[in-house]
Image: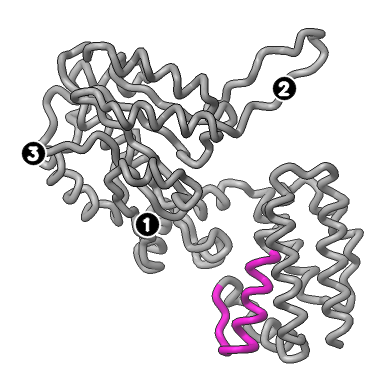
């Protein structure tokens, strides 16, 4: 299991101070791609460990730690969508198709905690439930969790990990102790990525919204890097942009990823026009400033609102290629109006 990241040590010290008076539920919240799940797993293992170190970290050598690392600990439950677990639903009845793994945490998954909550701990210590990401619970699942939170069992800790805590029920938030996992500084992220062997991590870090784990993931996807390079090559030449051809080239990329690239590009255009600063594509500063001088800020803001809608629709696109064509054509039309 992964240890703590350099930017998490201060938060770990705060957690260590809570162990004497352990709450029934903790909400770990922060941006995606900064290691919240890894922190939560370390927290869970440390609580179940039979011989934790002085700093509270798990020993990694006791029977409890071995069970935990083998994902067989009887006093630990991890609830997350099937899409994250790597499991798939059974074949449909006709046997001809398979359902896509769910992106939600179902009410059945949460209800399975009722029996777990009433069991005695196998080792007589704590029991831990980890829900990730908490906002993936559907309405029925969230309401079912409330029952467990309202009637907490002794020595059971529920850890909720959330990228979007604003989507959780207020009644759930009120029953959790919130711990904020802060975004590391650019310097901390850059240093860590360099330690992982990444050369010149600045571009990937910016593309990932300055989340270091997301940047590391992007760097592993050579195809994604090539697609992003192709995207930048075309989008920086708006008057020559063939929106249909670019959509064809990018159709293997996830639509939400392309929308995200466009949002970053448009952010840089607006920031360059209003403040003379570039956040995400610093290597293209001159190009972006030249384009931003010609663009109408109101047109840009309208297009950015279109991208917000497109990002929501990109989660369940009926026709990904058609969606890409639409948003790229809208971009080209905006740029032609500015020329």
Q: Which residue is mark 3?
A: 54
Residue nearest the viewer, comparing 73 with 310: 310
Q: Is residue 94 left or right of residue 23?
A: right
Q: Residue at x 87, y 71 (%)?
A: 241
Tell me the crowding category of disc 3: few under 14, some 14 to 19, or many 20 or more residues within 10 angstroms, Cα based: few
User: Does label 2 or label 1 sit earlier along the sequence?
Assistant: 2
The image shows residue 174, relative to residue 130, as above or below, that is: below
Residue 95's spot in the image, x, y percent?
79, 9
Q: Nearer the viewer, residue 164 or 107?
A: 107
Task: Look at mark 2 in the image and give the residue it sits on.
Answer: 99
Looking at the image, tell me whether mark 3 or mark 2 is earlier in sequence order: 3
Q: Secondary structure at mark 3?
A: loop
Of the numbered discs in the image, which one, if any, rests on residue 150?
none
* Residue 192, numbered label: 1
Residue 245 in picture, x, y percent from top left? 90, 59
Q: Position of residue 191 (x, y in %)?
A: 36, 62
User: Where residue 251 appears, x then y in whole percent?
Assistant: 81, 48
Q: Which residues are magenta?
A: 262-279
């Amino acid at each position: 299991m992964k240890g703590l990241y350099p930017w998490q040590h201060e938060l770990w010290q705060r957690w260590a101070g809570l162990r004497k008076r352990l709450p029934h539920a903790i909400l770990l919240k922060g941006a995606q791609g900064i290691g919240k799940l890894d922190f939560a797993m370390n927290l869970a293992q440390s609580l179940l460990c039979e011989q934790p170190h002085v700093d509270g970290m798990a020993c990694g050598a006791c029977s409890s730690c071995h069970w935990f690392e083998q994902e067989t600990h009887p006093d630990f439950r991890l609830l997350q969508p099937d899409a994250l677990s790597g499991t798939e639903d059974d074949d449909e009845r006709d046997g001809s198709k398979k359902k896509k793994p769910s992106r939600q945490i179902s009410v059945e998954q949460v209800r399975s905690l009722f029996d777990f909550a009433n069991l005695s701990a196998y080792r007589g210590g704590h029991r831990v439930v980890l829900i990730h990401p908490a906002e993936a619970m559907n309405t029925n699942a969230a309401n079912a969790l409330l029952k467990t939170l309202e009637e907490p069992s002794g020595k059971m800790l529920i850890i909720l990990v959330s990228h979007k805590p604003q989507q959780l029920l207020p009644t759930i938030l009120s029953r959790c102790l919130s711990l904020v996992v802060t975004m590391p500084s650019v310097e901390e992220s850059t240093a860590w990525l360099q330690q992982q062997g990444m050369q010149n991590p600045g571009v990937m870090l910016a593309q990932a919204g300055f989340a270091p784990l997301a940047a590391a993931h992007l760097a592993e996807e050579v195809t994604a890097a090539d697609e992003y390079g192709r995207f930048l090559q075309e989008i920086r030449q708006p008057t020559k942009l063939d929106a249909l051809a670019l959509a064809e080239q990018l159709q293997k990329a996830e639509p939400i990823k392309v929308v995200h690239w466009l949002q970053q590009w448009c952010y840089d255009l607006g920031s360059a026009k209003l403040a003379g600063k570039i956040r995400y594509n610093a290597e293209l500063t001159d190009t972006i400033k030249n384009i931003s001088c010609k663009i109408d800020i109101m047109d840009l803001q309208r297009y950015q609102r279109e991208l917000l809608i497109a990002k929501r629709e990109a989660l369940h696109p009926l026709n990904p290629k058609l969606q890409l064509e639409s948003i790229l054509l809208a971009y080209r039309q905006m740029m032609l109006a500015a020329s």
